[in-house]
Image: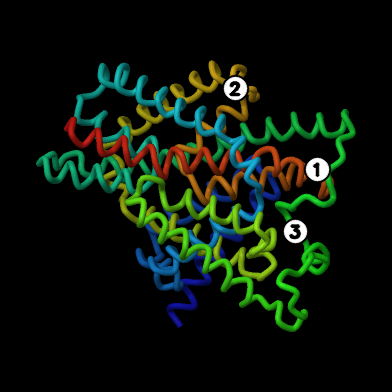
Amino acid sequence: MSFLLCFLAVMLFMLIGEWVSAASKAYIPSVFVTAVLFIVGYWTFIPKDVVTQASYNTEFVQICIALLLVHLGTLMNLRQLIQQWKAVAIALLGVCGTILLTLTIGSFIFDWHTVISAVPPLTGGLVAALLMTDGLRTAGITALVALPVSMFIMHSLIGYPITSMMLKKESQRLINKFRTESIKLDPNRPKMMMNRADSAAVKRIFGLPDDYQTSSFILVRVAIVAALSLFAAQLMHGVINSFVICLIFGVIAHQLGFLEGNALNQAGVFNWLIYGLLAYVFSQLNLTTPSTLAHIIIQIVVLIILGILGMYLASLILAKPFGMSRPMAFACSLTALFGFPADYILTTEVCKNNSSTSDEEEYLLENILPKMLVGGFATVSIASVIIASVFLKLL
């Protein structure tokens, strides 16, 4: 019974977030609302292991990540993926802007160890936060041990609504362009969103009868591509992040005809996997308490403001040379604050709530989602870990 109640609590938090987002037309992102509910819940009545009890354990989440990234690869083609080098450059240079402002202005306000321990999680995800926490313990700087994880929790909460605001501005610009220029989408292109009618009409592969084109057949092929991706990552000894390889292999498998477009939606499991991964991300919010946060809240808020200001200034300068609007460039930089899957959720929510037709939604997704995904991989999955490794030596 307790396992079912934990699952109910997790899904209820997700539901409330989605309803608030829909009611506010994505001005209040679902991930922000759900994250706040989890924090309040952890500080009051829900158990710290609610997500694990709801069946979303570490092993399940590792499967989720690999399968979902292969799936996202089936939404793109190689040309689209290669074109996103500008988004990668802006995201990484935005991180440089964060480092520059926090190390200069931040060091005038706070001591060196405070700034050094806060910057890596500010420019990335949980891995960077845990690396810095272990480094602080090893160095005997116990007074700051809670800072990296607290920074990881707080910067996401602040980043969600700002990113949603930037994405709304970009979507409004694109919708105006779509309508005024009477843009027509190629009906034969792979779709990033798919309804039941599209799924039923999709061309079946391998020439098998419909009775054999089952959900498990799709999942087996997605799992094969995911397993090959992780094997390739091991052979390369982490030179290229395994998440990036999953995405690339998904693109290639789709281009070769081994996987259908929008594979996991056709298998009927996409939402289940994305909810599981999102729940696991929110489970990290149980790592801090009101008392620990109260002692370091000023440092966290000031450094987050400096970090986001650095991202904004970098994107402001780089937007025009890289052929992007300022809101889109800033949104790419902001992916450093959360990464996947939050970048996917924020983008799809905004695109859905700011379009009137399926073609408009598809146009928005095609022009925004690839940029957000690769920006998040470049910052959270790759750059933040490198930054943390370098900053550990500066403690």
Q: Is residue 386 above or below residue 201?
A: above
Given residues 290 and 120, the one toward you in this image is 120
Q: What residue type is labelled 2?
A: Phe
Given residues 156 and 388, the one toward you in this image is 388
The residue singled out by tag 2 in the image is: 322
Q: What residue type is labelled 3?
A: Met
How far apart are labels 1 and 2 at the CA level? 24 Å
Residue 385 x/y as whole percent? 33, 42
Which of the marked residues, 1 or 2, is nearer the chain's N terminus?
2
Residue sitting at x 58%, y 27%: 329
Q: Is mark 1 on a helix, strand or loop?
A: helix
Q: What element carries label 3?
A: loop
The residue singled out by tag 3 in the image is: 194
Q: Visible in this render: residue 43?
A: no
Mark nearest the camera among 1 and 2 is 2
Which of the marked residues, 2 or 3, is nearer the chain's N terminus?
3
Image quadrant in which you'd find residue 47: bottom left
How far apart are labels 2 and 3 at the CA level? 31 Å
Q: Residue 360 carries which label?
A: 1
